[in-house]
Image (cartoon, rainbow, N blue to C red):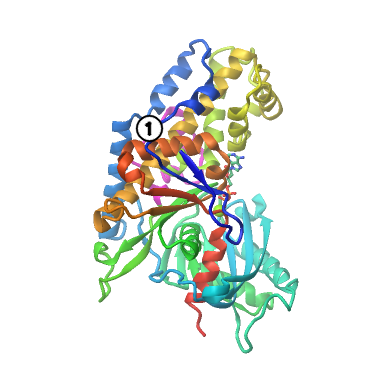
Amino acid sequence: MSLMFSSPVVTPALGSFTFSSRPRSNYIVMSAVRSNSASTCPILTKFQKDCDTPTPYLRNVANAIADDMRDGLAVEGGGDLEMILTFVDALPSGNEEGLFYALDLGGTNFRVRSVQLGGKKERVLATESEQISISQKLMIGTSEELFGFIASKLASFVAKEKPGRFLLEEGRKRELGFTFSFPVKQTSIDSGTLSKWTKGFKVSGMEGKNVVACLNEAMEAHGLDMRVSALVNDGVGTLAGARYWDEDVMVGVILGTGTNACYVEQKHAIPKLRSKSSSGTTIINTEWGGFSKILPQTIFDLEMDETSLNPGEHLYEKMISGMYLGEIVRRVLLHMCETSDLFGHFVPAKLSTPLALRTEHLCKMQEDNTDDLRDVGSILYDFLDVEANMNARRRVVEVCDTVVKRGGRLAGAGIVAILEKIEKDTKRMGSGKRTVVAMDGALYEKYPQYRQYMQDALVELLGHKLASHVAIKHTKDVSGLGAALLAATNSIY
Ligand code: ADP
Ligand code: MG
């Protein structure tokens, strides 16, 4: 696996991976689990078996995702994947000029960004951004509260602007690219209604409403002279922002709190697109998190799903994205605790608390290189009130590894489904053309084992030859730039 560093963008990309034909390595797996593996534990053994994703099974998953993609392109609601038309036909060219804004709402934080674009040569002249966390209360409150809060933060962001650095052309309203990363039925580039909340949001009175109107109204109420010019999601934003710097980018994938993927599709391959012109390309927002077939669901996944805000839905997202991996592990550990004396004779209250273990903790535990797995011990103690001996610590790491391996490999299968769809229509990779998947999200960025498992699955399913033309490029935080660029592309001026 070669690691190349890409040229700095607005926020420097950390690097990108290209696939070489080197045989796959098990190094990370072995270092995480260790050779003197925990003595047998029936619950763990069964869990590992239930989570297993051998290559032929993974191939079936990739094929099933591809089938749902095709069905979703044929008719509205044809498959688990919504395959939403984004109304983004033109990706940024580099010629965009002027001051534009981006607002990204879709997870634990929202981000605002200003970008002064200087055209082909000068590109990004200036940019500022700010990240603001969204309280649990706002996530399940009313739309007035949520959008009022966002508009007020946006207004103070604009008020702090240094006049010399940013220049709004006279007579113009400020224009904003709104990244709204929830399933939206898009009706034009600057309007769309929310289909359903995901990722722990449940703001009342919003489903079926035009989210752009909600934001425009809130901005007006706060005296902010700004309008939404483009409504996108984070996958589209990532794809557009990454494409600004690299024209081989064909796919944008998010692996963070939630997950999604967008890609460049040929219009003639979209039967449900009832437009006169079937030439050219357009961006499809797959909403792949909604995929829910033939997944290796265990009893722990089922129980977690039942208590989620959207039971029975988004099962793929619940297996591969950051919001859920820690919670699955916690449920397995709780079961181990209840049915064996692995962690002593009582069940600590914290271990029974939903979301007490986060994906960040799994990552830290898998990174633990100490002889006595000291970090594993302290995370279990600090976050779950569990005192674990060496044997128990090893088992915990195995549980983490099992969940992360399944997640990473399934994410890889999804990417393969998209790449093979692109390949079928364009023969890009087959003819040796570099094809880039722009990737964003802290799960991908910060969890090396997850990344490795994902890449293993990609090579296993694509084969070394095709995979050698694929680059997974970590494009951190370009979705804001992408949204601002799409606001520029769709400016009313
Ligand atoms: P969002 O998806 O909310 O826009 P991010 O891309 O920052 O935001 O993703 C945040 C998610 O990434 C967290 O919910 C968590 O699941 C996961 N994550 C954050 N930090 C780490 C880490 N160090 N290791 C593994 N996963 C992490
Ligand atoms: Mg995000």
The residue that disc 1 covers is 296
Say whether residue 204 is visible: no
Q: Residue placed at 31% from the left, 39% from the top?
A: 463
Location of residue 369 in the rendering, given as x and y in whole percent from the top left corner: 63, 24
- Residue 250: name its quadrant: bottom left
Q: Residue furthest bottom?
A: 171
Give the structural element (helix, strand or loop) at label 1: loop
**77 and 433: which is toward the camera:** 433
Image quarter where the N terminus lies is top left
**436 and 355: which is toward the camera:** 436
- Residue 448: name its quadrant: top right
**43 and 19: which is toward the camera:** 19
| Three-letter residue code for mark 1 | Pro
| Residue 124 against residue 264 in the figure, above or below | below
Q: Residue placed at 40% from the left, 41% from the top?
A: 412
Few, some or many C-alpha atoms within 10 Å of disc 1 (few <14, some 14-19, many ≥20)? Answer: some
The magenta stretch spans residue 290: yes
- The part of the chain drawn in magenta is 288-314
Q: Residue placed at 59% from the left, 34% from the top?
A: 363
* Total numbered circles: 1
